[in-house]
Image (spheres, rainbow, N blue to C red):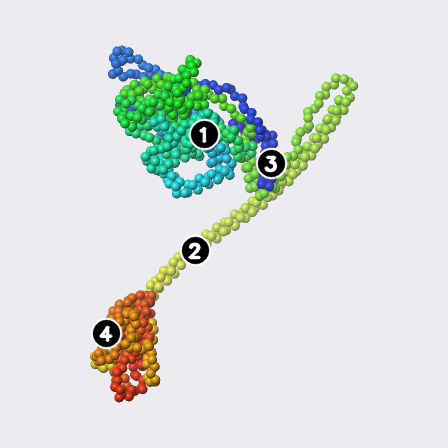
Amino acid sequence: MTTGVEVLSVEFRAVYSSSGFSMKPARYKLSSKKTPVKVRPGSKDLVKVFCRIRPLHNNEESCVKVTSQTTLSLLPPETRGSHRLANCKEIHHTFKYVFDAKATQKEVFDHVALPLVENLIHGKNGLLFTYGVTGSGKTFTMAGEPHNGGIMPRCLDVIFNSISSYQAKKFIFKPDKMNDFDIQSETDAVLDCQNEIHCARSLKTLRKVICFRKESDVDLSQRIPDGTKIESVVEDNSYAVFVTYVEIYNNAVYDLLENVPEDIIRSRQFQSKIVREDASHNMYVHSVTEIEVKSTEEAFDAFNKGQKRKRMAITTLNSESSRSHSVFTIRLVQAPLDSQGEHVFQDRKAMCISQLSLVDLAGSERTNRTKNSGQRLREAGNINNSLMTLRTCLEILRENQLYGANKMVPYRDSKMTLLFKNYFDGEGQVEMIVCLNPSIEDYDETVQVMKFTETTQEVQISQPAIRKLDFGLAPGRRKASHIFKQALQKMEDNGHKETSDIDVDIGIVYSLLPALPCLELTDPSMDTLIKDLAMFLELRMNRKNILLKDWHQKHQDFYKRLTEVEKEKLLAEQKCSSLKTAVEQGRNKISALEARLVGYESYVMNLEQQVEEKEVTLVTLKQETQMRYQEQKLRKVKQILTEDSCLSTHAPRQSTKSLAIICKPPVLKTNISSHVFSSQSCKRGPAVSNRRHRRSQSAGDGTWLEHRPVPAIELSTLMQPLMKRYKSVTKLTDVKDIANSKTSKYCLMTQEQDSSGELETHLYKADVVPTVGGGAQVIFNDVETLKQQSPTTTPSRKRSASTSKLKDTEAECAMFMEGHKRARH
């Protein structure tokens, strides 16, 4: 760990370029040669075996007795035959440390896993097993509960507590699918991050994300994180954490973090993976999913996702029995920063990869106790075979080490032992936690477990010698870069808007030249020595004068600059005081305006309320006026209808006013906007052919509404128009007679006497046009006269009086319609 003195002892020169300031070391240069640091050769350590005793439940009797922190005794039950034959003996076993039933998760982690985490940060590998029979507390020791975390979450907490300030950006370290990593530039990392975001927005990947959230949806609000922090972290390195989670089920390896469709997850038809050897002869799971995590929560989500996919089952001995071995691996990648202390050094040889594998072994089972059959029996057989292979490998390793034998260790007999082959061959530290169920019923299984632990504790694991390459990089680069950036930012905040204004003065070196030469006089005739000494002293005096002159100049410059800064400070304080006064005045003005605004708002609300009341009053008056006007019109219509009925009963002539009243649409809700009447001229002239006045063919193809009031005489003797489709009415009492989609023509028929006393029949023809409001317009466009007279009678040339009556009726009808329209609106 680099101290502050070491950081400040590194000499940096500030160099200004077009892009700004850059910092380069003046003394340390990057060397192309990689010089390994001399370290002591690798040593051998025994496998550390710890023991943890599960608490008893339901008044069970214990067969285990803890005698000290490192030893315990097994007491055989009295029902055994050996006890009856007086051959009962206590069996003593020694461990690295024994945790009794009262031991907490924190104590277990501090004694067992914390040293492995520290070695992981220092570049060493580690392997930790939890071994024991079914229901002895292996999974609880490894994972724990949300409010009482086990070894795995506490390891993640300690790692991120230690490297939180030194993590690299995401995708700087990228897995190459061959158990190694590539170092990318920040540009490539940003592109990969954008691609990940783009893929997450697509529908297919979005479903996977939703599925992932459902699978890993665990409430972490009750989780209590571990606050332990490792201080011996290399500050000049950048770190990244990757996690993988696999299970070994029926001697096949499956990836628990792989993104697969939901139907495969339900059916648990996962694709098995292959265990391979990389270029460095390390065993790994090929094409396994490695997730880069930036916090404990992200890693815990990945672990919970795998836990929900892990194969579990209910057995006689355990309600949640693991049917497979699970391996959660934490890989820590670290690489040094470059010479400027800003970016990761782009050399794969400088990268260090270490991993910690946390293995939760499935419990060994006996068929006569579990009563398993079928699939469960097959699973138990594979579990026991893999555990037996592990035991065999450890026994052969111990035999080779004790007796110098060269037997081949059968790692390939099981996928589990093959995957951890490198650890047993000397690629890391191996530890084991033996979980015991102290119940008397598990005595036989406990004895077998103890025999296995005796073998395991005697196995020696070679510890590799760690070699660090020296790339000639100065220590304290990160801190120096941070201090340099802070200084530049402070200069900019103090008024230097452009860093080009900063004058970096290297200055002269304050030294009085080399030390005094030797003044020993060995010969009286050595006059040159005195001359040389005088010259040397003269040079020193000149050097001293130059330094004093330079010092006085810098002193004056500094005093002048200090005076200017003091003046600027006074001006700034005055300006700040005036600005504070202006701000206070502005606040007072704003407060007054806010008070006035509140008054205006209440005044506006009162005005709006008055306007609403007046509008309501105006609407009421308007409705009353319309009702009165409508009543007057209806009264007038009623009076005219009464007169028409009297005329039609007593008088032989029918007034044209009845025609206008019948055509009025207020009762029928039909808007007759205009009336076009064409009357026949009274003057007779030469006969002219007019096709429009063909009486027998005057009706077109449309549907006619024939309006025939009560005639004066029968019309059977008169000529009448020919209508193909028509409807005949005597009075217009229903609005549907005119305002419907079928009626397109209208014909009003009246009878009158001309000046000579002859009877005339007038046909007033019109077009019916629908309107937007749902009514109809009746547009008169033709008048046809039917007259029968004697050939001996001379026709009168006087104008019929009916024409003037018709015009009066038309004007009255128009006035009525205008009033009715206003009343409706």
Q: Are marks 1 and 2 in contact (CB under 8 Å)?
A: no
SS under mark 2:
helix
Task: State the image coordinates of residue 799 (x, y, percent, origin top left).
Answer: 31, 84
Asked which quadrant contains residue 808, the reply is bottom left
Q: CA distance from mark 3 to mark 1?
A: 41 Å
Residue 14's mark? 3
Q: Is residue 819 visible?
A: no
Query: Which one is in front, 293 or 140?
Result: 293
The three-letter code of the residue at mark 3 reads Ala
Front tag of 4 and 3: 4
Q: Which residue is mark 2?
A: 597
Sequence-wise, which precedes: disc 2 or disc 3?
3
Residue 154's mark? none
Sequence-wise, which precedes: disc 4 or disc 3?
3
Query: Which one is in front, 582 or 115?
Result: 115
Q: Are marks 2 and 3 in contact (CB under 8 Å)?
A: no
Q: Which residue is mark 1?
A: 179
How many C-alpha atoms fall within 10 Å of the one at disc 2: few (<14), some, or many (≥20)? few
Q: CA distance from mark 1 to mark 2?
A: 71 Å
SS under mark 1:
loop
Task: State the image coordinates of residue 131 (x, y, percent, origin top left).
Answer: 35, 23
Q: Residue at x 54, y 46 (%)?
A: 576
